[in-house]
């Protein structure tokens, strides 16, 4: 484990260098034409995860010398292997972006092994040097920074001091968002609690509606989420007269009177970095990460109902994040069972791979990782 973590740190340095060297302007220069494939687990207009990717791909399509092929509604089964191989064999794709969590292992790895000259960049997975092929890699953003900001705003706007988080699965990326949101809210008022309901899968609209109504019945007055399409949660919360902090893309137009702010992806940054390396013959960036500072994520504009103190508090934290002087996960920190998980004086930077293995819920969260 320790060796793997040291290797990942080296890779992270390399990823940073790739960002610095790759530049985004290089795509405008004469480079080899390329066909790039993008695969989504849901529809491209889901007001959420898949739409955030599709919006970035729409921008990629405007760049010279790039042909983008897309396939939506591809399940996390062998179906995605067929989709990837089809893009390679029929469309001539030499770089693939399988965007859903479950595409990584075994599906992407299996197809990558059969196509050593094709590059694969997966969204969210943990690429490990010495374990995974060099023609594979992963990219992700520190969107927990924006979820922390969501929490700060929610903490100011909640009257009941009860927040709700509706999530798909208790995987590390989801737990990290739940924890960051809760910590942001509790930085405003330590008595605030976040109740979590896990629906069991990325798109479960009936369960998402039921969970939203259940939490509203329990007095929750500000909601956020980590599901593929937040539309149902946003609209249900708004109908109940509750506030919402969005996720993935902006859902403001679905409920303008309820939408406080949101945590949005800006995938164009990662896409350009990885595509630029492929077109210019640079080594495949195997581990690409970034946050607010690097332009990988962004907050939604504030709704008109957000108070001046809430805006100022969130803006102050955002400014510190942009300077690189704010750390979310630092000690002393306890989980919601009272166990110390980060000792006093210990700080985990956003780039620390340890955070990508998060398996706990922090103090202030009502719920279980096995729920």
Image: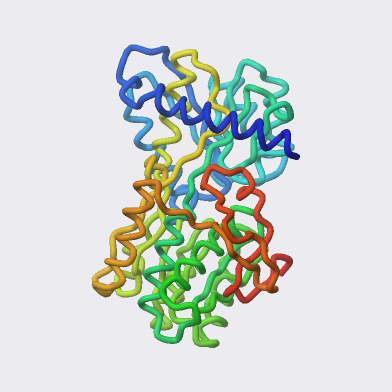
Residue 248 vertical position relative to residue 353 in the rendered view, above or below = below
Residue drawn 37% across and 18% down? 65
Q: Quadrant of residue 184?
A: bottom left
**Quadrant position of residue 67:** top left
| Place of residue 89 in the rendered image (x, y in percent of width and height, measured from the top left) | 61, 20
**Foreground pick, 327 / 167:** 327
The front one of 159 and 165 is 159
Residue 79 left/right relative to 158: right
Q: Residue at x 42, y 63 (%)?
A: 246
Residue beneath the point at 48% across and 70% down: 233
Question: How many discs appear?
Answer: 0
Query: Residue 299 occupies which quadrant of the picture?
Result: bottom left
- Residue at x-position 65% and y-position 22%: 134
Q: Is residue 10 above or below residue 52?
A: above
Left/right of residue 232 with respect to residue 11 in the rendered view: left
Q: Position of residue 141 (x, y in %)?
A: 48, 45
**Looking at the image, what colour scheme do you see?**
rainbow
Report whether 207 appears left or right of 300. Answer: right
Q: Quadrant of the N terminus?
A: top right
Q: Quadrant of the C terminus?
A: bottom right
Residue 80 at what x, y percent from top left? 65, 38
Q: Position of residue 228 (x, y in %)?
A: 53, 56
């Amino acid at each position: 484990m320790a060796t793997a973590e040291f290797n990942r740190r080296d890779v992270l340095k390399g990823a940073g260098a790739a960002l610095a060297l790759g530049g985004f302007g290089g795509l405008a220069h004469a480079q080899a034409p390329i066909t790039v494939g993008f695969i989504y687990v849901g529809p491209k207009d889901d007001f959420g995860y898949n739409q955030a990717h599709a919006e970035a791909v729409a921008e990629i399509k405007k760049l010279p010398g790039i042909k983008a092929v897309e396939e939506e509604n591809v399940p996390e089964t062998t179906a995605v292997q067929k989709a990837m191989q089809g893009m390679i064999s029929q469309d001539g794709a030499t770089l693939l972006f399988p965007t859903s969590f479950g595409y990584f292992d075994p599906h992407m790895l299996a197809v990558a092994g059969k196509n050593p000259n094709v590059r694969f960049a997966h969204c969210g997975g943990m690429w490990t040097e010495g374990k995974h092929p060099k023609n594979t890699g992963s990219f992700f953003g520190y969107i927990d920074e924006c979820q922390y900001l969501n929490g700060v705003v929610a903490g100011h706007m909640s009257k009941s001091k009860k927040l709700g988080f509706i999530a798909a699965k208790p995987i590390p990326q989801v737990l990290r968002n739940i924890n960051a949101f809760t910590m942001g809210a509790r930085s405003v008022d330590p008595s605030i609690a976040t109740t979590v309901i896990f629906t069991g899968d990325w798109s479960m609209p009936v369960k998402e509606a039921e969970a939203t109504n259940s939490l509203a019945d329990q007095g929750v007055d500000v909601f956020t989420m980590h599901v593929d399409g937040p539309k149902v949660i946003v609209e249900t919360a708004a109908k109940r007269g509750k506030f919402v902090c969005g996720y993935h893309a902006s859902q403001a137009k679905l409920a303008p009177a309820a939408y406080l702010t949101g945590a949005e992806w800006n995938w164009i940054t990662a896409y350009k970095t990885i595509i630029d390396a492929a077109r210019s013959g640079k080594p495949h960036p195997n581990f690409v990460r970034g946050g607010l500072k690097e332009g990988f994520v962004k907050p939604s504009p504030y709704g008109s109902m957000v108070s001046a103190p809430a805006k100022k508090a969130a803006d102050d934290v955002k400014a510190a994040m942009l300077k690189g002087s704010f750390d979310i996960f630092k000690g002393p920190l306890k989980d919601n069972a009272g166990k110390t998980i980060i000792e006093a004086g210990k700080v985990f930077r956003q780039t620390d791979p340890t955070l990508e293995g998060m398996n706990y819920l922090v103090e202030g969260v009502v719920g279980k990782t096995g729920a």
